[in-house]
Amino acid sequence: MNDTCILLGLPDYRKLSGVVAAMKANRRLRDLHLKRLENELSTADVVEPDDLPGDVVSIGSSATVIDVDTGERFTTRLVFPAELDGTSATASVLSPLGVAIIGERVGANVSCVSPSGTKRFVVEAVARAER
């Protein structure tokens, strides 16, 4: 496994690749974080779901992250946009934060560009989704 690549289960890889391909076909792949996702998918290490370690952020899992600059700690469940509940309890896998943490392991330092500037986070914990 390449330590600089994200790690994805095959179902997540297929879903995300399909979304990126559809957005690209519709010329909607303009946002920097979505271009980042496209690049990460092209180099991702992809494994069978049963081989995905429990400390990897995946679709449906809950991640506790720490904002490096403020020290704020919060937990959010990574979902597709249709599953957002309007609170910080969920984050879209297609948002800047979602793209930054998908496929990352506990302890990873990640960054994303938000409307207020570049934000830096550490993935502190992951709770896997129930199957």
Image (spheres, rainbow, N blue to C red):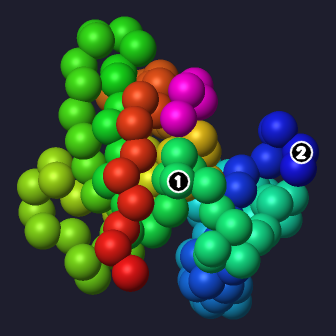
Marked residue nearer the N-terminal end (1 or 2): 2
x and y percentages locating residue 122 in the rendered image: 47, 25
x and y percentages locating residue 82 in the rendered image: 27, 82
Q: Is residue 94 visible?
A: no
Position of 112 relative to 14 (above/below): above
Q: Which mark is residue 2?
A: 2
Nearer to the camera, 85 or 116: 85
Mark 1 lies on residue: 54
Q: Inspect the image, locate mark 2, and give the three-letter code of the amino acid beneath it.
A: Asn
Question: Residue 107 in magenta?
Answer: yes
Residue drawn at (45%, 68%), measured in percent from left and top?
59
Q: Which stretch is magenta?
A: 106-111
Q: Inspect the image, locate mark 1, and give the three-letter code of the amino acid beneath it.
A: Gly
Q: Quadrant of residue 121?
A: top left
Position of 122 relative to 90 (above/below): above
Q: Is residue 79 visible?
A: yes
x and y percentages locating residue 93 in the rendered image: 44, 63
Q: Quadrant of residue 50?
A: bottom right
x and y percentages locating residue 100 in the rendered image: 54, 44
